[in-house]
Amino acid sequence: MSGSVTVVARSGMTLKNDGKEATKNTPWVPDPVTGYYRPENQAKELDPPSYLRNVVGAFRQRNANR
């Protein structure tokens, strides 16, 4: 178990990392919105209510023009 890391994702799925990925150097850059530093390859988190509002709004606009 030495050197292993256990991560619990939001979905509840457990992932194990044996430390091999930790050896990769990922540069940290400031986030343009918050200004806090984050890994460069980190995906932007989506706010589900905002995303749903945008998708439904686009769907309504598309159907209103028909």
Image (cartoon, grey):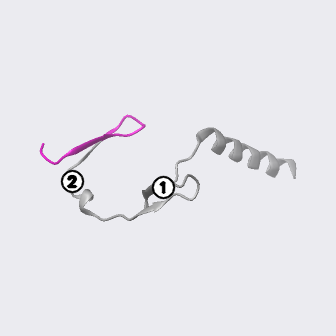
Residue 18, above or below 50 = below
Residue that appears at 37% across and 34% down: 12
The verdict on residue 62 being magenta is: no
Q: Which of marks 2 and 1 is nearer the N terminus?
A: 2
User: Tag 1: residue type?
Assistant: Ala
Q: Is the magenta stretch mostly helix, strand or loop?
A: loop
Residue that appears at 46% across and 62% down: 29
In the picture, the disc for residue 19 is: 2
Residue 66 seen anywhere in this rendered image of the structure: no
Q: In which quarter of the image is residue 15?
A: top left
- Residue lying furthest top: 12
Q: Position of residue 49 (x, y in %)?
A: 64, 38
Q: In which quadrant is the N terminus drawn? A: top left
Residue 2, above or below 31 = above
Q: Please state if 65 lies on the left or on the right of 35 as rendered.
A: right
Q: Are marks 2 and 1 in contact (CB under 8 Å)?
A: no
- Residue lying furthest right: 65
Q: Please state if 58 lies on the left or on the right of 65 as rendered.
A: left
- Residue lying furthest front: 35
Pointer 1 local density, CA inside 10 Å: few below 14, some 14–19, many at least 20: few
Q: Position of residue 30 (x, y in %)?
A: 49, 60
Q: Mark 1 points at which residue?
A: 43
